[in-house]
Image: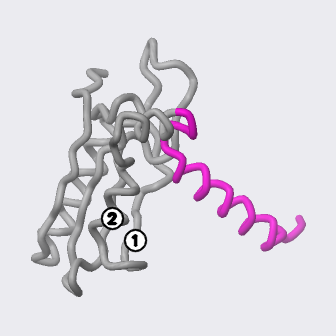
Amino acid sequence: MTEPNTNKLLQELDELRSQSKLGGGKHRIEQQHLKGKLTARERIHLLFDEGSFREIDSFMTSHSAKGEGEAKPLGDAVVTGYGNVYGRLIFAFSQDFTVMGGSVSDTVGKKICKIIDLAMETGSPIVGLNDSGGARIQ
């Protein structure tokens, strides 16, 4: 049995992180901008103190339902995490319209519930940034 190449594994992790940051892809990000709208990540960037946001569950994907196709963007249709706003710990979720119109799936619901639970456990505020076309009934 050979030891995994650490550099290769780190490179794969970086590739996954880059992929998750694209949400529904470059084309859908461009469509958001053409409508004069910010993406979920751009909104997060504006909300939090610079460099303080820590994303969680960025690799979760939805369960493919009939008619959804094969694409399963990492993170599904919501960005969740925590950071500081004017130095205070804040938890947040930002729905990502570039992924299936920001619609709520089972995975999105789990991610939002988890971030709410973490906020409650720490006594911290939670901010929800909504940009959604509704829910996916699966």
Residue 79: x %, y % from top left: 36, 53
Name the one closer to the observer, 113 or 22: 22
- Magenta extent: 1-27
Q: How far apart are marks 1 and 2 (CA)?
A: 5 Å
Label 1 belongs to which residue?
54
Tell me, yes or no, whether the two marked residues, 1 and 2, touch with CB atoms within 8 Å. yes
Name the residue furthest right: 2
Say which residue appears at 89% left-offset and 65% top-offset: 1
Quarter of the image with the C terminus in it: top left
Residue 2, image quadrant = bottom right
Give the residue type that dot 2 points to: Gly
* Residue matched to label 2: 81
Q: Quadrant of residue 128?
A: bottom left
Q: Determine the residue located farthest toward the bottom in the rendered image.
A: 87
Circle number at residue 30: none
Secondary structure category for the residue under label 2: strand
Left of 132 or right of it: where is 23? right
